[in-house]
Image (cartoon, helix red, strand yellow):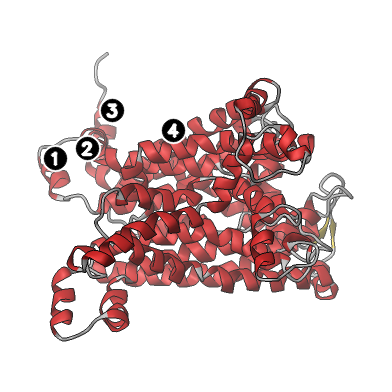
Amino acid sequence: MPVSEYDQVKRGWYRRNEIAITPYLFLIPGVFFFAVYVIFPVFQSFNISLYKWDGLGEAEYIGLENYRKLFDDRAFETSLWNNLKWLVLYLLAIPAGLMISLFLNQKITGIRLYKSLFFFPFVISQIVVGLVFSWFYDPTFGLFTKAIALIGLEIKGGVLGNPTAVTYGIIAAGLWPQTAYCMILYLTGLNSVDPEQVEAARLDGAKGWKMLWYVIIPQLKPATFIAFVVTIVGALRSFDLISIMTRGGPFGQSRVLSYYMFEKALSEYGFRMGYGAAIAVVLFMIMLVFIAYFLWSMYQDEKGAH
Amino acid sequence: MFPTPIEKQSRGIQIGYQAMVPVVLIMWLLPLLAVMLFSIKPEADFVSGDYWSLPANLDGLNNYYKVFFESDMPKYMWNSIRITIPTVIGCMILSSMTGFALGVYKFKANLWIFFMFVAGNFVPFQILMIPVRDLTLDIGLYNKVQGLILFHVAFQTGFCTLFMRNFIRALPFELIEAARVEGIAEWRIFWYVVLPLMKPALAAMAVLIFTFIWNDYFWAVVLTQGSEAQPVTAGITSFNAQFRAAYHLMSAGSIVAALPPVAMFFLMQKHFIAGLTLGAVK
């Protein structure tokens, strides 16, 4: 087929603008998928939260009524408090991970295998972690129950049957894999600590806690930042553990927003999509504070890179 | 090195340390070791209330036989594979392209699009739940593995783009400039210059995504039901309902379900850790 003049013009135009156009062509599939499944749904959920809707029939516009109802909802209040507990206590994974990584940062035979085995809890699914811990806490045969009985303690109804203890028990289960994750981040960070600075500080007489606080931890800042990000995200995503360990019980005392939303929107007693969406929006707004902070930090980094 | 290398300490401390590490490890993994023990104990032990003795014989291996041949477990496992593998491949394709576009080219919207991916990656799942479930119902993929795959690919693209873009940023840009001077088309630069260099990053990412998707539970219960399409994480919970307090079967089932990501981790350890800790050092 002879090359028409039109083709040549077209090719010429493409050739001339190739560098400007290529990135957009490469972005189209990824951005399309991400927009359809992630970006638009966020806005759709905001919209749904203004309606009363059972997921099947007509949706009825009720304005901010769903949000007003949240104020009188005791279960919502409990979930919100529990989310706060998760956020604060989950952060313990960071110092715990640092401690284990310092403990393991040695060169002895088999240390690589030890490190991998310490990391183990992170690799298995939270569903299995949840099962493992519900047996660990079991009031009749659980190892935990036996262990605290040795020092004369007893938790009424078992950890997971006790309204006061239950959330702490689930958070402790969540801390297990999360600490492993933070540990691996810090092990990598410790690997790249500048040995000259450590030696210099040693000559100046720094050691132990002082060395850790003034020399090592500042150098671990990138690892700490990532540990913070993944721990916050993990705390607000907590769903699997609650779902498998207690289903929000006893008496709804272990619910968090993510679980409560799921329960409301897809409950056995009829779907309450609008109300569920309103809960999701509240959870999203909490996360948004952190997302803004993460992006701001990344933006500062990007600026520094140029 | 910090803390002070153990080689520089006294002999006593060295031996003490070497003895302490395994002890701490056993305490750390105690809940898991308990499940391993449960999984090889015969049912009779549980009936008689004997939870913690070592099994007297090998009858307990029967538990694994039952899991594999008398339960829906293999079906759920197969579903997990059917969901996980295509998702990993889809993510690799999409994010190598987006990562290339955002890592190599300078254009106005670059940072904005990048931040959109990063921000989207952090949103709570619940804000997406109702619309994504509706969309999946509308296109007829509810309770089908394809519905889960499409969502997972789309969502993980956020994380994968972050990952690939940062990796490509760290490549020597001179390579691309040299290719341009030679007059090589941009898509060929992607295919012949950048893609081969991305191999280690793609491997690391693939292992991570495999683990994330295999372990997903939330979307499995939102977008599927029953043994036709549900992955093993959701299967375990119905297993839980089916066998109630059959601890021996539950623990054997859990171990089987957890095995693939564990195997993946031990086989590809270097890639796995490189992926997880990307950005933990400057």
Measuring from the top left, give residue B236's x and y in whole percent.
67, 38
State the separation of the CA atoms marked 2 and 3. Answer: 23 Å
Residue B37 occupies which quadrant of the picture?
Answer: top right
Query: Which secondary structure lies at badge 4?
Result: helix
Q: Are marks 1 and 2 on the same chain?
A: yes
Asked if labels 3 and 2 touch by Cβ distance under 8 angstroms, the answer is no
Query: Which secondary structure lies at badge 1?
Result: helix
Please determine whether, in this image, residue A141 is positioned above or below residue A192.
Answer: above
Measuring from the top left, give residue B74's x and y in whole percent.
62, 25
State the separation of the CA atoms marked 4 and 3. Answer: 35 Å
Local packing at callout 4 (Cα closer than 10 Å; few below 14, some 14-19, many 20+) is: some
Q: Is residue B164 visible?
A: no
Residue at 53% in and 47% down:
B155
Q: Label 3 belongs to which residue?
A: A7
Please tell me which of labels 4 and 1 falls first in the chain. Answer: 4
Q: Is residue A3 left or right of residue B223?
A: left
Asked if labels 2 and 1 touch by Cβ distance under 8 angstroms, the answer is yes
Q: In the rendering, which numbered label is found on residue B189? A: 2
Give the quadrant of the C terminus of chain A.
Answer: bottom left
State the separation of the CA atoms marked 1 and 3. Answer: 25 Å
Please tell me which of labels 4 and 2 falls first in the chain. Answer: 4
Asked if labels 3 and 1 touch by Cβ distance under 8 angstroms, the answer is no
Badge 4 sits on which subunit? B
Q: Amino acid at mark 2?
A: Ile
Q: Nearer the viewer, mark 2 or mark 3?
A: 2
State the separation of the CA atoms marked 4 and 2. Answer: 21 Å
Residue at 68% in and 57% down:
A137
Query: Which secondary structure lies at badge 3?
Result: helix
Residue A298 occupies which quadrant of the picture?
Answer: bottom left
State the separation of the CA atoms marked 4 and 1. Answer: 28 Å
Q: Are marks 2 and 3 on the same chain?
A: no
Q: Nearer the viewer, mark 4 or mark 2?
A: 4
